Amino acid sequence: MIWVIIGALILCVLGLVATLFFISKGDEGYSSEKSMGNLTLLYTILVPISVVVVIAVAFLFM
């Protein structure tokens, strides 16, 4: 059970780092459509991968 919690914490940190990376980019040429597209892509990829990883870890260590 502790591994699931550790895995969830790691995924949260990765999500935070990725979000901060996209936020830290400069404002030149900013468009809300591009920003929304980047975040949509990020979370479209990150959420399914995180679910698979959490489920895999849960089954491996239970």
Image (tube, helix red, strand yellow):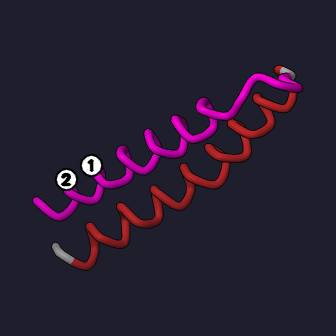
Relative side of 33 to 26, left or right: right
Depth check, front residue: 22 or 11: 22
- Residue drawn 64% across the image and 54% down it: 45
Kind of residue indicated by mark 1: Leu
Circles 1 and 2: CB atoms closer than 8 Å: yes
Residue sitting at 28 percent across and 59 percent down? 7
Q: Main secondary structure of the magenta part?
A: helix
Kindly report the distance in space between the C-alpha atoms of the residues bearing marks 1 and 2: 6 Å
The nearer-to-camera label among 1 and 2 is 1
Measuring from the top left, give residue 4's x and y in whole percent: 22, 59
Say which residue label 1 marks: 9
> Residue 25, relative to residue 47: is it above or below?
above
Q: Which residue is mark 2?
A: 5
The image shows residue 61 at horizontal and vertical percentages of 18, 75
Q: Quadrant of residue 57?
A: bottom left
Where in the figure is residue 24, as x and y percent of width and height? 59, 32
Looking at the rendered structure, the secondary structure element under dot 1 is helix
In the image, residue 17 above or below residue 31: below
| Picture residue at 36% right of the left edge, 46% below the top | 13
